[in-house]
Amino acid sequence: MSAPNIETIVSLAKRRGFVFPASEIYGGLGSSWDYGSLGVELANNIKKSWWRWLVHERDDIEGLDSSIIQNRQVWKYSGHETTFSDPLVDCRACKGRFRLDKLQDVSCPKEQSANAGSGKECDLTEAREFNLMFRTTVGAVSAEDDESALAYLRPETAQGLFINFANVLNTSRRKLPFGIAQIGKAFRNEVTPGNFIFRTREFEQMEMEYFCRPEDAPHIHQEFIDAFQEWFYSLGISAENLKLYEQTKEELAHYAERTVDILYRFFPERDDEEKQFDELMGIANRKDFDLKAHSKKPEDREGKRINTDSNEDLSYFDEATKQRFYPYVIEPAVGVNRTLLAVLMDAYTEKTNDKNETRVILKLKPELAPIKVAVLPLAKNKPEIVSMAKDLKRQLLPAMRTVYDDTGGIGKLYARQDEIGTPFCVTVDHESLEDNAVTVRNRDTWEQERINVSELKNYLRGRLEK
Ligand code: GAP
């Protein structure tokens, strides 16, 4: 089972402290969201999993953390200043503003039954291009519109990786093929944000650029498409909720040779199965577009430098063949927030207890669970039990995130931990004081086992690693 719709997750997320609407006390801000104590842990665990799997375990990828605000030239030569825009239309009747290419996904506020633009009352303006980059000014400038101080909040983390290609190559002494990875915030002034954390104006990306010889690019591309599906499975996402989508020639970005998106079933409530899926990540073969675009050497047909502002040539010299060329790039780009939403939706399960009450269980993989173990005293008015439970929490804590909770009866405490995805509850009862053993309860099966305190840490460690 997984969540029946995003709304179920919105309500769980707010009720239990995963995600809150941002600026709520001032009426919110469109599509901004704040991550609460459990949400920030879950997001961190997703990012840790990606980083460990890609940067540490493969050993052919270096990490990087580049600036959010870069020299404006980065966005000029990447093409974002001229092409990073959406076609925008206004409706003179309902005053709505829509993306021309997404009219079928939004409804007209006046005619709820009709898709925007398709109703009797709709009166759309001509489309105009709207650049999605957030603008800002750098330094204490005199006027807000001072073009010389203009800068942008990055709309993707990728460009920070390309412009550091030579720095990383020279300092890490890597040879092709190798990759550079980073995790960080990106900003897009989306025309129609929405669907909770699916499309927001501020979000986080996990991007990697893998530099290789042109002839190796097609098979490396396919390897990453396969590997990323496996990574999503390792996060607990079921195969039936994932799907590959091959972008058509018309959809491909001008620099891309091939792009495959991994889609997740974010909208299971929709009748049309095709429309249930939307993009979770994209994996593109960007050819040599980016390194060339940021290099000082390439010339146009008339022999003029194309990039007149760069001080660097980002080509690669192959010692073996004595050839210099611009490497091709394979780019797997994942959104942290969309991954978090997919993980929550897929982990969502309902189970009926023996009193015929429905309980929510978040079957998160232990690696991702915000809290690994909750230690609960059966009687909070018994000082010896409380003290033993608090002691256990302290013992377990360095090895695994453990909390102590005595804020309700045991049934309520179990239900709360099930709902936030804690894999194990450890209960200290009267007998524990005699036999030095505790009850360990499994979140998914509700089975209980009696474990001696001296074996508890190893037992839990073993079960959490499974
Ligand atoms: N460098 C390539 C790039 O940025 P993208 O498909 O525009 O590609 C990659 O973005 C991923 O970032 C998407 O698949 C999605 O997971 C996430 N993403 C993009 N725009 C987003 C938004 N407005 N809100 C949340 N996540 C977003």
Image: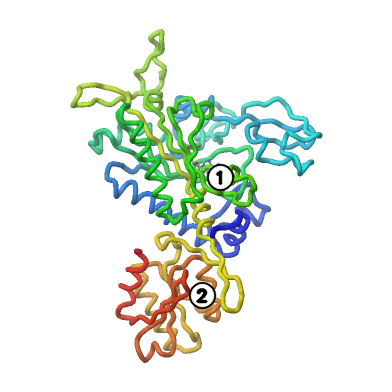
Q: Residues within 10 Å of mark 2 (few under 14, many from 20)?
A: many
Earlier residue among tags 2 and 1: 1
Distance from label 2 to label 1 (Cα)?
A: 34 Å
Which residue appears at 39% of the width and 83% of the height? 388
Which residue appears at 77% of the width and 35% of the height? 119
The residue beneath circle 2 is: 414
For badge 1, the amino acid type reads Phe
Q: Please, is residue 309 above or below residue 408 in the view?
A: above
Residue 56 visible in the shown view: yes
Which residue appears at 50% of the width and 70% of the height? 417
Question: Hey, which quadrant is residue 324 in on the image?
Answer: top left
Q: Please, is residue 78 above or below residue 51 in the view?
A: above
Q: Would residue 319 be found to the left or right of residue 438 on screen?
A: left
- Screen quadrant of the N terminus: bottom right
Q: Residue 281 appears at what percent x and percent y?
A: 47, 42
The residue beneath circle 1 is: 277
- Screen quadrant of the C terminus: bottom left
The secondary structure type at the circle numbered 2 is helix
Q: Would residue 115 be found to the left or right of residue 243 on screen?
A: right
Q: Please, is residue 230 above or below residue 291 in the view?
A: below
